[in-house]
Image (cartoon, rainbow, N blue to C red):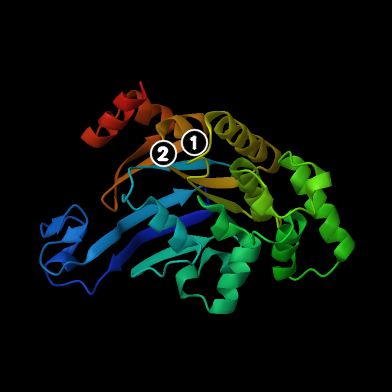
Amino acid sequence: MYETPVLSVRNLVVRHGDGCPQCDIGASSRSLDKNRCTVCGSVWAANDISLDVYPGEVLGIVGESGSGKTTLMRSLYFDIPPTSGTALLHGFKDRKNNIWEAGNAQQRMIKNNIMGMVYQNPVMGLRMNYSAASNIAEKIIAAGSRNAAQMTARATELLEAVEIQTSRMSEAPINFSGGMQQRVQISKALANNPALLLLDEVTTGLDLSVQAKVLDLIRKIKAAYGISILLVSHDLAVIRMLADRTIVMLDGRIIESGLTDQILEDPQHAYTQQLVHSLI
């Protein structure tokens, strides 16, 4: 693949609860019922997660609700503090410093300059009563720019890229359809040319025809910008369409990983086999 990943995550743990000697012994602890400790009740939302994302690739993460997919994504975007683990990111301290140990100002810099996030629920990623152009400008201002003409030009460019008419730039996303809101989120996430785009269930809840348009847009963005993408979905059809490699998660753990074609054609884990069978 590539020599240096854009993102390297090692041994990420997100535990809700204090833990106990029984569940602290590792990812295979026998005191865990799925991802909950039967002794102390702690929930291991992410349990010893390690992964790499390489330049220009789409890494898919698939799994059922509660598998830890969104916990992983929101930890990377500093919405959820991890219990332990390291993450090294291209563009931050020469990949020598753990982003989760960075100060608040540095974490804001990472969010505004190096990563972009598109949430399943657009309300989490947009100011719904600001105009579409203002949402993009907010991201640009957060990265340090104050040039109004440049911000307007960039907002125009990005909204055109996601096929939103520039005549609607001044409209607020609250007036848009769900698919349009997702496209505004994507344009906002791309505002400062991030090295890594995080997409969390971006087609869930959309009509099938709208889903197809959003997925086609993501494919075009990858081709146009050469951006690395971490793509979370519970739907293997989405993963099949977009992902170069795929990680399968269950109960907070990675249970299988490999090239997407390999995962789909020759799944090894019983849960992955069930997923693939449901897709056929």
Rendered residue at 25%/71% (across/down): 17
Q: Secondary structure at mark 1?
A: loop
Task: Kindly identify the amino acid type of the residue bearing the numbered disc 1.
Answer: Ala
Res. 153 in view: yes
Q: Residues within 10 Å of mark 1 (few under 14, many from 20)?
A: many
Rendered residue at 72%/58% (across/down): 136
| Residue 179 to residue 137: above or below | above
From the viewer's perspective, is 69 left or right of 196? left
CB-based contact (under 8 Å), mark 2 and mark 1: yes
* Residue labelled with disc 1: 243
Instruction: State how far apart marks 2 and 1 are (Cα).
Output: 6 Å
Q: Identify the mark at residue 246; answer none if there is no mark.
A: 2
Q: Secondary structure at mark 2?
A: strand
The x, y position of residue 16, in whole percent, is 28, 68
Which one is nearer the viewer's eye here, 121 or 148?
Answer: 121
List the single residue furthest toward the front: 175
Rendered residue at 32%/43% (across/down): 64
Task: Kindly identify the amino acid type of the residue bearing the numbered disc 2.
Answer: Thr
From the viewer's perspective, is 248 left or right of 132? left
Tell me the quarter of the picture where residue 144 sits.
Answer: bottom right
The x, y position of residue 228, in whole percent, is 57, 46
